[in-house]
Image (tube, helix red, strand yellow):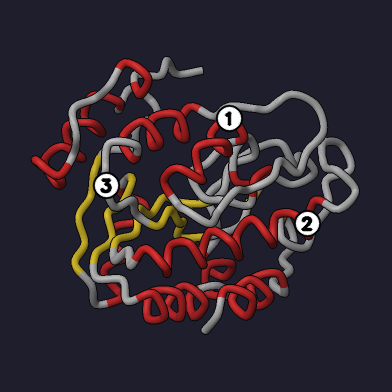
């Protein structure tokens, strides 16, 4: 598997009520070549993760309309894009939308913790696309089982290709699914809906002394 082959396969997935940021174009927010930009963002990111030798995934549920729908990167909003080169050398994702950068609450907290690690994880989702309510693309909904079945083999290929040994689930939605891949699975509270303190405590429990003390610059206020 290569980043190009993986992203090309992901871009081929087409489902009703699902925005695929690697093939679909948002007429409201996207630049003209946004899908191609997001494909490159993901290719470069996966290549950087492979070069680092990362063996851990932080796995959320699916892409959100304020984050991954716009960036093509899981658990990442546009406000976090300038941070990539520091933590994932060789990856410098471009903003694929018009107007000011949009921030997302979950991404803010995820990246505040990620910045404290010497070896960052691969950020990914159970369902690596953006499912939305019918006729309302700027909403988030949980993926359906039939939709998940369309991407499970891609997820399996990703885990095997990168030699992933551990999945840290961001919220309970990912836990049962992650366990099917035969790797170590841990779970922390999702930082949204009042879960920030428990999320931070969970990450501290998992990483212990490998997590550097928080700096003032990583104590980012949630939007």
Residue drawn at the location 34% of the way across and 40% of the way down: 114
Mark 2 burial class by Cα count in 10 Å: few <14, some 14-19, many 20+: many
Residue drawn at the location 39% of the way across and 74% of the way down: 162
Residue drawn at the location 72% of the way across and 61% of the way down: 22
Which residue is identified by label 3? 118
Mark 3 burial class by Cα count in 10 Å: few <14, some 14-19, many 20+: few
- Front in this rendered view, residue 69 or 41: 41
Mark 1 burial class by Cα count in 10 Å: few <14, some 14-19, many 20+: some
Q: In the figure, 112 relative to 179: above or below?
A: above
Residue 201 point in image, percent of width and height:
16, 32
Element under label 2? helix
- Which comes before the other along the chain, label 2 or label 3? 2
Which residue is identified by label 1? 79
Left or right of 177 on screen, residue 137? right
Is residue 64 among the parts visible in the rendering?
yes
Which residue is identified by label 2? 35
- Which comes before the other along the chain, label 2 or label 1? 2
Left or right of 66 on screen, residue 17? right
Residue 214 point in image, percent of width and height:
24, 25
């Amino acid at each position: 598997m290569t980043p190009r082959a993986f992203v090309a396969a992901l871009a081929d997935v087409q489902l009703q009520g699902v925005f695929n940021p690697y093939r679909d174009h948002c007429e409201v927010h996207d630049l003209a070549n946004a899908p191609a930009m997001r494909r490159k963002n993901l290719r470069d990111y996966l290549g950087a993760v492979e070069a680092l030798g990362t063996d851990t995934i932080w796995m959320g549920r699916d892409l959100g309309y304020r984050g991954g729908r716009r960036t093509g990167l899981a658990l990442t909003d546009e406000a976090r894009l300038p941070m990539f080169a520091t933590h994932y050398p060789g990856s410098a994702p471009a903003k694929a939308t018009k107007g000011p950068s949009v921030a997302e609450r979950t991404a803010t907290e995820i990246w505040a913790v990620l910045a404290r690690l010497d070896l960052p994880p691969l950020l990914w989702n159970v369902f690596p696309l953006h499912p939305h309510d019918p006729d309302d693309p700027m909403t988030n909904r949980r993926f359906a089982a039939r939709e998940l079945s369309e991407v499970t083999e891609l997820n399996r290929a990703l885990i095997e290709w990168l030699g992933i040994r551990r999945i840290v689930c961001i919220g309970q939605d990912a836990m049962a699914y992650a366990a099917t891949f035969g790797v170590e699975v841990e779970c922390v509270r999702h930082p949204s809906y009042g879960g920030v303190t428990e999320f931070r405590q969970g990450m501290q429990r998992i990483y212990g002394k490998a997590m550097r003390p928080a700096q003032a610059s990583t104590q980012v206020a949630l939007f």
